[in-house]
Amino acid sequence: MFNILRAATLVAAAYVLIACTATQQDSLYQKAMDLGEWKAGLDEQKSDIADIEMNYLIRKGDGPILMLVHGFSANNSTWLQFADKLPDNYYLIAPDLAGHGKSSEADSYDLERQAERLKALAEHLNLGPFHIIGNSMGGAISAIYSARFPEDIASLILIDSAGLDGENQSQFFAELEAGDNPLIATDEASFEYRMDLILEKQPPLPWPIRPALIRETVERAPLNREIFDDMLATRERMDQNEMKRMISSNVNMPALIMWGEKDRVLDVSAVAEFKKVIPQAEVKIYPDLGHVPMLEDPSASAETISSFISKLD
């Protein structure tokens, strides 16, 4: 998402010469996202899916089908630069999960319910077996989907995935235990702290787009709290033992685990826990990246995944 904004620099320069209003900032931000979608060959669509109106990006092709599942408080623009680096014939679907991006809100953000909505999307699009790729919360949802509907899944690809805890506690979980949630930004200072926590390799975010993104993120704080509470409720209901049992019993398809070694949200020690229950999984660790490798280094992430998928076809 953020690397794409380089392409908006020339447009931004025109705004720098004047006092750029909030409306102009928001307009430029949306134009940058539109440019990223166009560059990656993605079209934006909306459909009634299960109990919500779901927004999703789609690029049809005659190659492997990939569903890209973003993380907590993110949206499908997370995947734009990554999608642009994948082979042109890949069939891509990048949904906004319920309550995120341009999809509508819902009565529940339970992770199993989110997986069921993705199942409904796959049926709506009449997809054959597809590769599901999930980051962070999206990884946990992807693992649940793969365990509940394994017949749909050609492979499971987890990128710094939630769902199983590692031996070492992350900075994020330490702060959460202390009563703070650094993933929910409530002002400019907490937004900047959140960005630093999530991204080890900070992409450029040109002014005046940055204030538009800050406003959008801060305005979402009440809804993000609701979504996070439902995510924690899922975690309590489906405890570690239940998650391990469900994954180990049903996730038998090819799998790939990718992780940024400097992840301060979900510690890299979780890789070993996932590997125990998905023994067939290949593992790729990026030594200089953080929680969102496909955003921090989209080229390397796309190369890892396309190489993995090419061996399966």
Image (cartoon, helix red, strand yellow):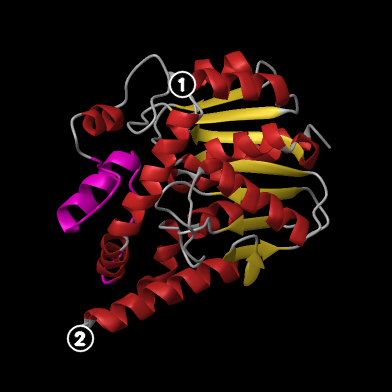
- Tag 2: amino acid: Ile
The residue singled out by tag 2 in the image is 18
Between 168 and 52, the residue placed more toward the observer is 52
Q: Which mark is residue 236?
A: none
Residue drawn at x 42%, y 23% as measured from the top left: 268
Q: Which mark is residue 270?
A: 1
Residue 157 spot, x, y in % from top left: 63, 35
Classify 232 as above or below 208.
above
Residue 12 spot, x, y in % from top left: 32, 76
Residue 306 left/right relative to 311: left
Residue 201 left/right relative to 4: left
Nearest to viewer (mark 1 / mark 2) = 1
Looking at the rendered image, the quarter that the N terminus falls into is bottom left
Between 196 and 125, the residue placed more toward the observer is 125
- Tag 1: amino acid: Ala
- Disc 1 on helix, strand or loop? helix
Residue drawn at x 60%, y 52% as measured from the top left: 85
Res. 311 image quadrant = top right
Residue drawn at x 32%, y 61% as measured from the top left: 220
Residue drawn at x 60%, y 56% as measured from the top left: 94
Magenta residues, start to end = 181-208
